[in-house]
Image (tube, helix red, strand yellow):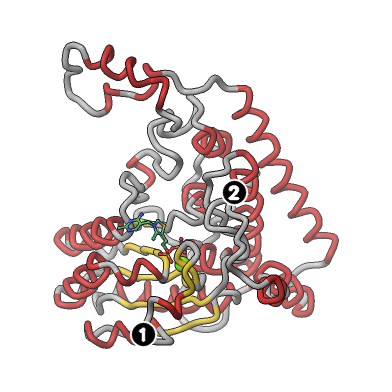
């Protein structure tokens, strides 16, 4: 499958047709890939409905920029960097062919991809690491940028506030994108946030903050593109609040009984993918036939990736890779890990 990553979007003006098509294809891939992972792994985090934020944030970055995706929908960032889809699916399945060879549930890949991995379960830690990457770019005097996304609930973590403060004081080249899906597990945002718009938090750190419709991929991408240009230009960070809705559960196996079905249905009607498609058909970007062909291509690629991943063996204790953790493997490590091998999936 050809990669959905398109050219950079350039400065100013409306998005061109090539970029719009790239964004649509990126959303289709994210939907298909993440849905497959949810079907294969009940602990996966459904990203359905949030693809406008995910694709809008990470599409069109330069290959030397850093991405720090949220754990909900991370695989698009990897795919945009040319990751092998069967190794991504294998990662979600704990297979030996997964990029992390069974060491993590899902969101890690080779450092060479320039993606900040989720190596800890603590919310917000990637925001600090991503901000550190931007500090590195600042030190090297380059025009590289970092784009970092995280959930609405995560903006209540100290990591978020400390990182934004320093990023602003040091004018770091970073764009913070809040993937606002209105929930933190079963808790609605209104129960933990005393403000309607998270973007106003940018004000206390002296950086621009804006709220965009997260189900409008073109609006998200335009906002991120402009913030990226600002960061590249040495003008510092931006906070973008992209408002959407989590159509699935917190985990794939979450029945979500804490939500009203009619509210969920109303949000399904605002699904960012059909919305972009209808705008693009109306604008003459694509015909329905071409859209069907895009879906076919994406589904075929993901089906093939699933088949390859399923056929791979489960990660064994040897695959867990103490070789990549220690310069020299201490005596007895293998035996110690081996003793725990029966419980690694628990
Ligand atoms: C420091 C910390 N506190 C609590 C948790 C448990 N936890 C895991 S996901 C989650 C919800 C986070 O919500 P949000 O940031 O909005 O992201 P979403 O899952 O909605 O995409 C919580 C509370 C955690 N992993 N780390
Ligand atoms: Mg949330």
Pinpoint residue 243: horizontal percent, then vertical percent. Answer: 51, 77
Judged left or right of residue 58, residue 275 is: right
Pinpoint residue 199: horizontal percent, then vertical percent. Answer: 37, 83
Of all residues shown, which one is farthest toward the right?
A: 289
- Residue at position x 19%, y 70% from top? 162
State the mark number for residue 314: none
Whole-Å distance between the Cαs marked 1 and 2? 30 Å
- Residue at position x 27%, y 68% from top? 160
Q: Quadrant of the C terminus?
A: top left
Q: Could you say whether the residue bearing mark 1 is in a helix, strand or loop?
A: loop
| Residue 11 at least partly seen | no
Q: How many marks?
A: 2
Task: Identify the mark nearer the N-term, 1 or 2.
Answer: 1
**Residue hosting label 1:** 194
State the mark number for residue 253: 2
Ligand 1, by image quadrant, is bottom left
Pinpoint residue 300: horizontal percent, then vertical percent. Answer: 73, 41
Q: Dot 1, crowdedness within 10 Å: few (<14), some or many (≥20)?
A: few
Q: Could you say whether the residue bearing mark 2 is in a helix, strand or loop?
A: loop
In the rendered image, the vertical position of residue 165 relative to residue 23, given as above or below: below
Judged left or right of residue 227, residue 205 is: left
The quarter holding residue 217 reads: bottom right
Pinpoint residue 334: horizontal percent, then vertical percent. Answer: 28, 14
In the rendered image, the vertical position of residue 72 relative to residue 98, given as above or below: below
Q: Dot 2, crowdedness within 10 Å: few (<14), some or many (≥20)?
A: some
In the rendered image, the vertical position of residue 1 relative to residue 274, given as above or below: above
The quarter holding residue 143 reads: bottom left
The quarter holding residue 132 reads: bottom left
> Does the numbered disc 1 mark a residue whose Cβ is under 8 Å from ligand 1?
no
- Residue at position x 44%, y 74% from top? 224
In the rendered image, the vertical position of residue 54 relative to residue 210, given as above or below: above
């Amino acid at each position: 499958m050809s990669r959905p990553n398109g050219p950079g979007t350039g400065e100013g003006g409306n998005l061109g047709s090539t970029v719009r098509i790239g964004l649509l294809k990126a959303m289709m891939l994210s939907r298909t890939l993440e849905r497959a992972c949810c079907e294969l792994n009940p602990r996966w985090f459904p990203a359905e409905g949030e693809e406008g934020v995910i694709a809008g944030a990470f599409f069109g970055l330069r290959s030397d920029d850093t991405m720090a995706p949220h754990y909900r929908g991370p695989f698009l960032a990897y795919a945009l960097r040319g990751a092998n889809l069967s190794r991504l699916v294998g990662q979600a399945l704990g297979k030996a062919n997964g990029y992390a060879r069974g060491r993590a549930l899902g969101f890690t890949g080779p450092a060479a991809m320039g993606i900040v991995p989720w190596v800890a379960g603590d919310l917000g830690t990637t925001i600090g690491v991503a901000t550190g990457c931007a500090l590195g770019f600042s030190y090297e005097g380059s025009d590289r940028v970092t784009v970092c996304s995280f959930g609405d609930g995560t903006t209540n973590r100290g990591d978020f506030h400390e990182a934004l403060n320093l990023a602003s004081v040091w004018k770091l080249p970073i764009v913070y994108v809040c993937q606002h899906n209105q929930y933190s597990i079963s808790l609605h945002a209104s129960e933990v946030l005393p403000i309607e718009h998270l973007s106003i938090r940018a004000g206390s750190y002296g950086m621009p903050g804006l709220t965009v419709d997260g189900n409008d991929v073109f609006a998200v991408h335009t906002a991120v593109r402009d913030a990226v240009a600002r960061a590249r230009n040495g003008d510092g960070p931006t906070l973008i609040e992209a408002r959407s809705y989590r159509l699935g559960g917190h985990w794939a196996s979450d029945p979500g009984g804490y939500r009203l079905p009619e509210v969920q249905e109303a949000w399904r009607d605002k699904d960012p993918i059909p919305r972009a498609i209808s705008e693009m058909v109306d604008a003459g970007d694509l015909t329905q036939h071409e859209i069907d062909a895009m879906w076919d291509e994406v589904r075929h690629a993901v089906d093939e990736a699933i088949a390859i991943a399923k056929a791979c063996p489960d990660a064994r204790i040897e695959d867990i890779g103490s070789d990549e953790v220690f310069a020299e493997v201490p005596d007895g490590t293998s035996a110690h890990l081996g003793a725990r091998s029966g419980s690694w999936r628990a």
